[in-house]
Each structure stands twice: as C-alpha cells, then as structure tokens.
Amino acid sequence: MKSISFLVAGALSVALAADVALAQTGKPGIERLYIIDCGTSVGPDKSRWTPGVDVGKPLDMVGNCYLIRHARGLMLWDTGVSDDVASMPNGRPGQGGSPHWRRSTTLAAEIAKLGLTHSDIKYLAVSHTHPDHIGNVELFPQAMLLVQRAEYDWPAPSGPRFNPTHPVTKLDGDHDVFGDGSVMIVSTPGHTPGHQTLLVKLPKFGAVLLTGDAVHIQESFEKRYVPANNVDREKTLASYQRIADLLVEHKAQLWINHDALQRARLKLSPENYE
Ligand SMILES: [Zn+2]
C-alpha cells in the first residue's frame, strides 16, 4: 500500500512539474507524433470516392491511427478497423461497395511496441464513427473520448455508436485539447454529422492537419469530390474550404488518413515526427 501511494505521489509530482514547466516557459507541451499502421484496404470501385471518374477501377487505400505525446498526456486519434481483422487470413471483405480491409499488425501491438499500455492513453478522439475509425475504441475503456455531440447522438441502425459507459466529453465545435493551442480539434461536418479533423502543431516539423474522412485521397481534395457515402453535400464542400483555409493560415501539411500513396512517403511508428 505504501509503495502504491508512493508511486501515485511520484506520478502526480511528475505531472505537476510538467505543468509548472509549461507555465514558466509559455511553450506548448507537444512533443511528438507517431503514425501507426491501422490497416490496408482495397475499394472495389474508386468512383465511390470520385463520382463519375475511374468507374469500376479498384482503389488501394490505407488506414492510419495517430498517437500524440504531450507533456500533459498521450492522445490517440482514430483507432482503425478492429484488431481482430489481423487474425483473418484473407482480411474482412467490404459490403455494399465498401473497402476490403486487411491488417498486418494490431493497434494493441503497436502501442505495446512503444512500451505503452492501454491505460497510458489519456484522450481518445475519433474523426467520425464509421467502422474503419472506431474499431478499437474499447481497447481504451478509461480514455476520455472527445467527440462531437452531433456524432455521438447521430442515430445508428443498430444501437448506440459508443459504449454508453465510456467516459466522454461531447463537443459542440472546435476544441483545444491541452489548452495550449498545440492540438486543436476542428469541426468539419458533412461526411458524417459530427465529423472532426485534428490540427497538430509540432515543435520542429510544423503544423499538420489530420483529415479523418473529410478528405479521402489527394485527388478528392484537389477536385472537391463529394463521395457517394456522405451525409451532407453542402457541409462537406464547406469543410473542404475550411481545411484549405487552415492549411494556409497555419502553413500546415495535409495528412490524409486513407491516402496510400502519401503514407508510402511518411515515417511509420516507431519512427515519429517532432
Ligand atoms: Zn474511413
């Protein structure tokens, strides 16, 4: 008992020291970002994402999860398709034109490779509630879920979108996660009612905008394609414009969750960006 309270006191003093350091320097506490492989997929018909163009052609895609290390805690952004896909020899076929997913590794294993366990994750935010983004939310039952109220309350055909017992902060728009402007949730509705993207201002690398599915591939962004599986066309187009404005304002790079060509050029965990 004594050693446990000592450990808790030790952890608290480390956390407090980090807060004091932040207050004294005025510098944001963000440290680094990891891109985690959360699967690969093939869409059977690319024109699902590029209406009228490349009809019937397959589209190679990927799924990313992102881990952000900040002095005030770890945050996970998106969780990919569920880890059990990794144990399916042929992956999980899609339904109704959705992609066929495969996983060569699990999110749990990738977190463990960094010397972390699920309980180290303080905040968990998802861009939206399609299955290829929320597949592993319950691997982190204690993590504070940061989700737009419009997404949380969006009626689903089969029960609630999240476990009702999972701790949650329901957002009504933009949100500064750590209070220092280094990690900002940005409301980008349209693909789903409460879709959100993440602006991360890394200390050396600079700003990156993690799109979720507000953008599916680079071509979607350039041509402003509204995909077939989409809730509100006008809001989707407005969110494209908001993203374009943010990229200019913050001199940010656009990191597109499902863009396979882009991921091939980026470093995957355990390598990272500072
Ligand atoms: Zn997706």
Image (spheres, helix red, strand yellow):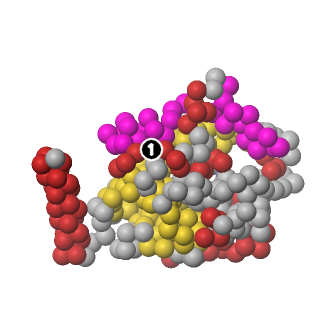
Q: Is the stretch drawn in magenta largely helix, strand or loop?
A: loop
Decide if residue 25 is in sight here. Answer: no
Residue 160, how many percent across, how many down?
66, 57
Residue under the point 78% across and 69% down: 233
Is residue 193 found left or right of 21 in the rendered image? right
> Which residue carries the number 1 mark?
267
Residue 206 image-quadrant placement: bottom left
Q: Is residue 89 above or below residue 232?
A: above
Does 157 appear in magenta? no
Q: Position of residue 218 (x, y in %)?
A: 65, 55
Q: Is residue 220 visible to the viewer in this orientation of the structure? A: yes
Residue at x-position 22% and y-position 75%? 23
Q: Residue furthest top?
A: 89
From the Cβ of disc 1, is ligand 1 less than 8 Å away?
no
Image position of 129 (left or right of 11) = right
Image quarter of the C terminus: bottom left
Q: Quadrant of residue 116?
A: top left
Highlighted magenta segment, given as a residue range: 90-117
Q: Residue furthest front?
A: 1
Locate residue 224, reporting x and y percent. 73, 65
Q: Is 179 located above or below residue 84 in the figure?
A: below
184 or 268: nearer the viewer: 184
At 66% from the left edge and 67% from the top edge, which residue is drawn? Answer: 153
Q: Nearer the viewer, residue 121 or 210?
A: 121
**Dot 1 surroundings within 10 Å: few (below 14), some, or many (20 or more)?**
few
97 within the magenta span? yes
From the viewer's side, name the closer residue of 45 and 175. Answer: 175
What element does badge 1 sit on? loop
Q: Amino acid at mark 1?
A: Lys
Q: Residue at x 20, y 54 (%)?
A: 8
* Residue 145 rendering spot, x and y as whole percentages: 49, 60
